[in-house]
Image: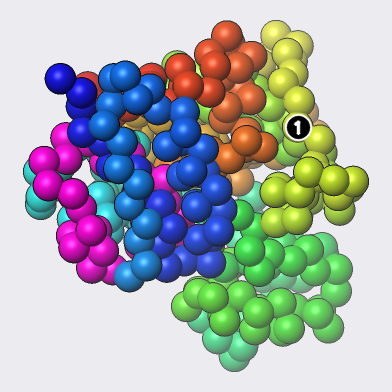
């Protein structure tokens, strides 16, 4: 008998469109000979309950941002006794909050860039910013997909960037800029998959370069680093996996600056579009997109 699977997508965050694109790709990839697939598009908070088909045996979460990646939906599904893909509520909530993530990284001895937060314009700590030095990155504390993220070169531009961030979140993070290349590490069931290096024509991995397929698209390539660097990123990836009690799969973003890897953030429900990073990493290990989708479900059910 086919397993009854609901693919949850959409949601109410700023990353709704990315979620819809990823969700449709997953629906297409799921083996219809093995699964009875139901597409569930969330338009409000109650849809998780009201739109869930009867008898669902597994919820495939293709959601991003608040009310999706923050542990809320995961908690609802646990109360409904429906297994789901990805990390549990606590891990999801911790990783969604960049400030908490960085505190846990720092407390665990895992390198991450310096930072400060602001809850209002009056709350901006210009002394701390001066200490870190310009440029800095300013972004929503709980956002994703680089929405409302700015590289700020001088004090005069800080206020406008913070205002933009506060339009989509209650807290804004102001983070030290570390020069270097960006890398991402995909971890599936505790195993570190091939590393991907990201280079963007805009200078950082912003929303346009993430999801564009034209001349503004970021260059994403699987790389095989020299042994010492590969060991460093693999070791850090496993340490992050253990520190945050990750389950099933996670994507960890790094910056390599002056020969040292620093963790930028964790993604507990990474993008699964045709241009997303983890399918590229899985493919380099010989897993097709469809096989990856299957393996995520398999490891989530362990």
Tell me the quarter of the picture where residue 60 sits.
top left
**Residue at mark 1:** 220
Percent x, y of residue 262: 64, 39
Percent x, y of residue 80: 10, 50
Point 67% across, 37% down: residue: 275
Percent x, y of residue 97: 44, 59
Q: Which one is nearer the viewer's eye here, 51 or 46?
A: 51
Tell me the quarter of the picture where residue 180 sits.
top right
Q: Is residue 291 visible?
A: yes
Question: Residue 289, relative to residue 226: is it above or below?
Answer: below
Percent x, y of residue 213: 78, 43
Residue 61 part of the magenta-drawn span:
yes
Q: Is residue 83 left or right of residue 275?
A: left
Residue 65 part of the magenta-drawn span:
yes
By what rule are the colours in the image chosen? rainbow
What type of secondary structure mainly makes up the magenta span?
Answer: loop
Q: What segment is highlighted magenta in the picture?
A: 45-69
Question: Residue 128, relative to residue 163: is it above or below?
Answer: above
Q: Is residue 181 left or right of residue 49?
A: right
Question: Residue 144, relative to residue 292: is it above or below?
Answer: below
Q: Secondary structure at mark 1?
A: strand
Quarter of the picture containing the C terminus is top left
Point 56% across, 53% down: residue: 18
């Amino acid at each position: 008998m086919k397993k009854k699977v609901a693919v949850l997508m959409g949601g109410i965050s700023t990353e709704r469109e990315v979620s819809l694109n990823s969700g449709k790709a997953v629906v297409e990839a799921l083996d219809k000979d093995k699964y009875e697939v139901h597409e569930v598009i969330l338009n409000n908070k109650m849809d998780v309950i009201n739109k869930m088909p009867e008898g669902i045996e597994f919820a495939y979460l293709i959601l991003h941002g608040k009310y999706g990646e923050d542990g809320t939906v995961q908690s609802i599904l646990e109360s409904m006794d429906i297994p789901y893909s990805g990390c549990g509520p606590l891990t999801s909530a911790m990783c969604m909050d960049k400030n908490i993530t960085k505190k846990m990284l720092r407390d665990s001895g895992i390198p991450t860039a310096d930072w400060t937060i602001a809850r209002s314009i009056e709350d901006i700590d210009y002394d701390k910013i001066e200490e870190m030095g310009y440029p800095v990155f300013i972004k929503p504390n709980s956002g994703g997909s680089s929405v409302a993220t700015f590289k700020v070169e001088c004090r005069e531009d800080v206020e406008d960037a913070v205002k933009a961030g506060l339009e989509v979140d209650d807290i804004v993070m102001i983070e030290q800029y570390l020069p270097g290349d960006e890398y991402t590490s995909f971890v599936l069931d505790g195993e570190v998959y091939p590393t991907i290096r990201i280079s963007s024509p805009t200078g950082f991995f912003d929303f346009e370069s993430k999801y564009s397929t034209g001349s503004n698209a970021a260059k994403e390539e699987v790389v095989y680093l020299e042994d010492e660097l590969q060991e460093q990123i693999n070791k850090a990836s496993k340490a992050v996996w253990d520190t945050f009690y990750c389950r099933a799969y996670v994507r960890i973003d790094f910056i390599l600056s002056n020969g040292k890897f620093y963790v930028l953030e964790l993604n507990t429900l990474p993008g699964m579009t045709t241009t997303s990073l983890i399918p590229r990493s899985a493919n380099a290990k010989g897993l097709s997109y469809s096989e990856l989708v299957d393996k995520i479900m398999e490891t989530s059910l362990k």
